Image (cartoon, rainbow, N blue to C red):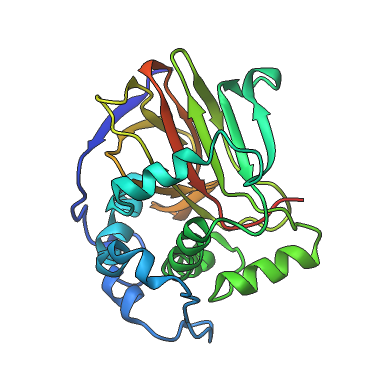
Amino acid sequence: MSEYRQLIRGATGSMGPMDRFAPATPQQLFDRPVGGDGITYGEDVPYSDDLPALDGLDWAALYGQLDENGVALTPPLLSHEQCQELISTFGRREPFRSTVVMQRHGFGRGIYKYFADPLPPLVRALRERLYPPLARLVNRWAPTLGERTFPATLAELTAECTAVGQHRPTPLLLNYGPGDYACLHQDVYGDIVFPLQIAIMLNEPGTDFTGGENIFVEQRPRAQSRAVVVTPGLGQGMIFPVRHRPVPGPRGYQRYATRHGTNAVATGTRTTLGVIFHDAR
């Protein structure tokens, strides 16, 4: 099967108007204080001083990238010092609830670790502050997919997860050395699945490691699959669907199923922070 390969590098830019793909434009989505479903959008922002880069994010452009490419690349969200702070936790035991050696489970090759509750302040801040603008987008996707909407704050989503037995936090650090890779997969974890997630690069590609590109594959109905290859810089985030996204077709919206993985690292060490918003069973 042939696959279309698209390469995304460097800083972000607007990828096209959202109104080609949804009833509202990206700016309308971002500016709208109350959704058509009656949800008032708020934020749970206890650590705003730690993450100044989040204040200037152009969410309209990021929404446009998601609809155009199925993945959005942010400007740097974390400083070099913050990236190093997270990398330094990988060799310690106390910040984590579990360790997964990927080759033991057929997931690829490498090691990842799930953070324990309570999450480190920096990880908690990212999760809480990035959730509300992403909830705005997925709540506009919901009627096109015939799916549920999500609450305005992460605290409300976490309470929903807890009520159905999903009580283990899912943010994780992934560490790959030479030859390590991740097979294509989806991060579902339970009945409640928030439709978007973010991965943040903590090393400098080309300096700390080579290879290790991020790969996203969309399965398009009655068509060949499409691959998107993304190479973020230090501190940049990749926003992408957990399972699928809506794309307009000749007879209404279609689900484009998405899986993601990582190409083999050639040299050096590659560490990534994964920010998933729903908890696990």
Residue 134 position, x and y percent, is 44, 64
Q: Confirm whether residue 224 shows in the render.
A: no
Q: Image check: 187 left or right of 86?
A: right
Q: Image check: 270 left or right of 171?
A: left
- Examine the image and state in which quarter residue 27 appears: bottom left
Front residue of 17 and 252: 17
Q: Residue at x 45, y 27 (%)?
A: 262
Instruction: Reply above or below: 270 against 220.
Output: above
Residue 239 position, x and y percent, is 40, 50
- Quadrant of the snapshot with the N terminus: top left
Front residue of 72 and 44: 44
Residue 233 position, x and y percent, is 27, 39
State how many labels appear. Answer: 0
Q: Residue at x 47, y 39 (%)?
A: 88
Q: Residue at x 49, y 21 (%)?
A: 181
Residue 152 position, x and y percent, is 53, 76
Q: Confirm whether residue 89 shows in the render.
A: yes
- Examine the image and state in which quarter residue 158 appears: bottom right
Front residue of 70 and 11: 11
